[in-house]
Image: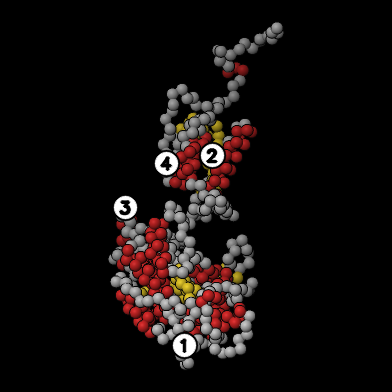
Amino acid sequence: MRTLQTNTDPDSAVLRSVTLPSVWSDDAAQALIQLTTAEGGPVRLASEAARWVEMIDSTPPLPHSPQDAPPIGRSLSCLLLMQQMAPNAAIWRNEPDGQPGFIIRLSGFVQDGIFATEHFAACLKLACDGLRRLEAARRPYRSGDLPLFDDPAPHDDSNGPAGLILLTDLDACLAALGLDYDSNEGRAIASAIARFTRLVARSGTATPDSAFTCPQAPDIEQASIAISSTMHSVTGLALIETGFSSPGPVDALLDVEACGPGPIFSLVTNQGGLRPSTLNRLAHKGLSPEAALALALDGQPPLQPAGAQAHALMYDAIQPFCDHLPALPEPEMDDLKEKLGRGVRRPLPMRQGGFSQRTSIGGHRLFMRTGEFEDGTLASLTLTPPRESPMARGLMECFSQAVSIGLQFGVPLDVFVEQFAYSRFGACGTVEGDDMASYATSMLDYAFRALSEAYLGQRMPDAPTESGEKQQEAPMLPFGPEQDGPSSRPKNRKLRLVG
């Protein structure tokens, strides 16, 4: 075990002490704080888990359970320590009106490249047993009746399911099996796991599932046949719904790489190291990290992250066998983390990165400042021409504020670059102070070509000078009376009245 000081609110100076297994990550510590009901004070995994373990063990066993069966709380806590299964927030916080459930990390059931079907089935049965015991104990209080009899009343499915079993970390599971997320075999294995989960959850209920065939996963197929044949004698069990999880603190507690059925969009972690799923896929291809780096430097990347289209295909493959699925993002959104929905403004970070640039276009000075989101993308823009007229300065500052608001609402930067690069109006001319450009047709032309190079990685060439276009260059020194040219007016010129 290890103890660390952390908090879920970055603006809060008050840190909480969290004690958890030493192999668990710091993200799991923050997730544990979110799941606890106590405000302030230290947080210990053993104390938090003991509450719901005791709550489940205090419920009477189901009628079909063996008389000498050991308490299931110990087995559930062992699965939590191995980060294979954890209860949802409703059980952690003991919410009477919440829907109890368990979240299962699929990648934790892959051993030596083989999916442990028997262990997975035992875990599912254990979760179903715990949920049905909780539902049987709470049902009389929800209906207003007192539990006067030891034998629970027959379950009525019209009152709703007894709980949820949600799967997560699907892509990491496929990677451990040596399968690509965007492949027919990967989708077949995912469908078989989802179907097998529903088969176990519905065995003994009023709407049981039947055994199925899956040539890509013969172990899962044989296990489905065995469960179907052994559960015919058990009836009257409460319905358990199944599916895949949405992002939440329990997924972070289990240290998943991708929540629910979603793909892993990046091959590296936030700290710059290779993900476990990346290492597994490289190992199945017979490549070491050094060999993969050599191929990438040679322009032949050995792995390609799955995109939104692969996510949609996986969603369609598992949807017929799931009661609950997270909302599928729009197919045209390639980067699901960075783009926002219409009408949702992305907040600016408290401390922003960016750069400041001082330059001159045709002798007219321009100060440009940028602000960035946490991921380094452009968040705000400030353009200030200090020596222009108050109206010109005000218009330029208002324009940059409008661009900043558009960026924060999800407008891509390349749209602004396409619209305003090479715009022609004064001041224009030679660019001084930035090697990115030698000539600009306007201040906006320079600004958005500079942003294109800095944030889009695309350097745009100078526009050709049109015939008759004059550079509006401010004089370097003021003209005095003795510097007037031959065309200047005479010094001693009298005034005359014009009738």
Marks 3 and 2: in contact by CB < 8 Å?
A: no
Where is mark 2, residue-wise? 358
- Bin the neighbour count of mark 2 within 10 Å (Cα to Cα): few under 14, some 14-19, many 20 and up: some
Secondary structure of the residue carrying numbered label 2: strand
Where is mark 4, residue-wise? 459
Residue 218, compared with residue 258, is above or below; it is: below
Q: Quadrant of the C terminus?
A: top right
Distance from label 2 to label 3 (Cα)?
Answer: 37 Å
Residue in front for this viewpoint, 123 or 27: 123
Residue 326 spot, x, y in % from top left? 48, 64
Side of 209 relative to 367 (left or right): left
Q: Residue furthest bottom?
A: 68
Residue 210, compared with residue 494, is above or below; it is: below
- Bin the neighbour count of mark 3 within 10 Å (Cα to Cα): few under 14, some 14-19, many 20 and up: few
Comes first in the chain, label 2 or label 4: 2
Distance from label 1 to label 4 (Cα)?
Answer: 71 Å
Q: Amino acid at mark 2?
A: Arg
Q: Look at the image and tell me whether residue 355 can be seen.
A: yes
Distance from label 2 to label 1 (Cα)?
Answer: 78 Å
Where is mark 1, residue-wise? 64
Residue 460 spot, x, y in % from top left? 42, 39
What numbered label is drawn on residue 228?
Answer: none
Where is mark 3, residue-wise? 299
Distance from label 4 to label 3 (Cα)?
Answer: 21 Å
Side of 401 relative to 233 (left or right): right
Could you tell me which residue is drawn at 46 percent across and 60 percent down?
328
